[in-house]
Amino acid sequence: MKTPGRLSLLRKALFSLITCCLFFGLLEMLLWAVGIRQLRDVRDPFVGFTPGAPLFTRSGDQFETTDVRRTYFNLQTFAAVKPAGTRRIFCLGGSTTYGHPWDDSTSYPRWLRDMLNAASPDQRWEVVNCGGISYASYRLAWLTDELLQYQPDVLIVHTGHNEFLEDRSWSSFRELSPAVRSFAALAGRLRTATLLDQVLGGASREKPGKPVLREEVDPLLDRSAGPSVYSRDDDRARMVVQHLEHSLQKICRIGRAAGIPVILVLPGSNLRDFAPFRSDFSQPGFANSLKVTQLLRQADELQQQQQPEQAFSTLQQAVSVDPRYAESAYRAGRLAADLGRCDDALKLLKQARDEDICPLRATQPILDVIVQVSQQEQVPLVDFASILDQHAVQKRGCAVPGDEGFLDHVHPTIDMHRDLAIGLGQQLQQLKLLPAEVDFRKLASGIEQSITSSLDAPRQAVGLTTVAQVLSWAGKNTEALRIAEQARQLDSQNVEVLSQLGRLYEKVGQMQDARNTLEQAVAAGPDNPWALYRLARLHMRENNWSAALELLERSRQHTTTAQPSAFRSVLFRSLSQCCEQTGDLENARVYAATAASQ
């Protein structure tokens, strides 16, 4: 039997607990009423950010993209004082939203902007392109805070491909116990924690060991020799997906709190016609890697012997030996698509995408999280991946997206930008922002000429050359060559197009094509230092030192400090080598010293 003293003690403890809960409950309600946000929506628990210039600054009676942000963003303007009756949409995303390899002029925000204004001539629509080159979801979530002050009516978020671009190690976060992580997650939901954080000045400092990102994007690829910097790290991949989930949830909560509809876009990628950036075996053991290599070689021989079925069976064996070796899955999936085995192709090509060591296409866990957040937060989702699937079926018979919808691994064709804009317009209709009878496909046909005419053949060629250059830098020379040849068809006299194409012919071993194309480039641009240098390098490969030296001297004469230091360095090293081979040892030493100083 309990003693009266113990019973009294329990009652006091219970009363104190209830009182404490009521106090903090009332405090949470008060903080909610005065607009204090949850800590998880104020500070990113995964990374910190270096404060920088806002995306938009006021210039007279309008806001425009800040000068220092135009390296990554289009120049956009909108009224500083939102006119009555105007609806304002901000499109957040990465380079697809930006309109890469061109700009806003052919992007889906441009298509949507023109269609909406054509659909409602009595109402003004401002569709602002906030697509940032290489921007991932966590940077978009950070940007959303700024956009709220510009009175948006809708936020459209297209993200997922750039989540692995920046270095976020989270070493200290990984070391936390599950209990500590759970407590931190609970604290992140409390406005009281936000108040305490502000009182203690926590907003101005970050936890030790927590990654702090620069003001602008700092891709791993820009600090290394391409995809080789990546290695398989399943723990990091899980953290990336968790961070994506947090970022999307934050954007959705911010929108809901402000009464602003948020629309998510499920991204798609080139599965059929784009091999993995980097493949690696799941285990370092020699036996399995040797077996896979032998099977891949056998499959090549069978395909050369016109035995595709047997080749496919051999490739399936390679996949079963090591399911995580992305190249095997890609080659098997590509052959399955060619054989009309659409289900096998889709399964294998998704496997190749997900096992890519350098994941620059949204993986299945990323896609799953986007769908999950859409359902949990009850925000609409425009399924761009399905739009691309339908286009692939119409063009090639299988729901496996490829070059018919993409310029490279993730950047859609102009037609696909149009179709995404149509899907977004139809979603705005479901939100009752437009009459149901508006026909967006008809509107798209009406404005197509004005959009496509803004991109003439020379501009198209330059954009494709940019794509080819990036792909080549990433080791994708075969894919880059295909795109560079398309660029030449659009503008056969552009020295930059020809110079890049000649370089790619050399990369894939087509030396005569390389020589012919680079000679055309020099003829089209006799003062272009890159074309002169690349043709000189061909002569050096063939030991034509005098011819190479003459071209290099011309390249030097037209090279300025505007050229990258890396180019100047290799140019002077090449000059030194040629001088040495032709017996001019004094100039060889001078050029070698100049190369070292660049």
Image: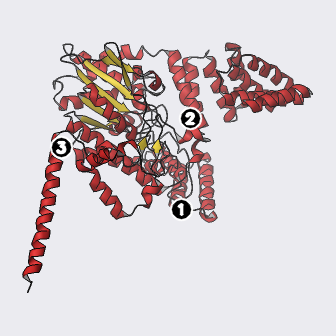
Q: What element carries label 2?
A: helix
Residue annotated with mark 1? 321
Q: Residues within 10 Å of mark 1 (few under 14, many from 20)?
A: some
Number of marks drawn? 3
- Marks 1 and 3: CB-CB under 8 Å? no
Furthest toward the bottom, the residue is 1
C-alpha distance separating marks 3 and 2: 49 Å
- Mark identifier at residue 32: 3
- 266, 245: nearer the viewer: 245
Residue at image position (53%, 43%) is 275
Q: Which of marks 1 and 3 is nearer the N terminus?
A: 3
In the image, is residue 571 above or below residue 355?
A: above
Q: Earlier in the sequence, mark 3 or mark 2?
A: 3
**Disc 2 vs disc 1: which is toward the camera?**
2
Residue annotated with mark 2? 471
Q: Residues within 10 Å of mark 3 (few under 14, many from 20)?
A: some
Q: Earlier in the sequence, mark 2 or mark 1?
A: 1
Q: Quadrant of residue 536?
A: top right
Q: Position of residue 460 (x, y in %)?
A: 50, 20
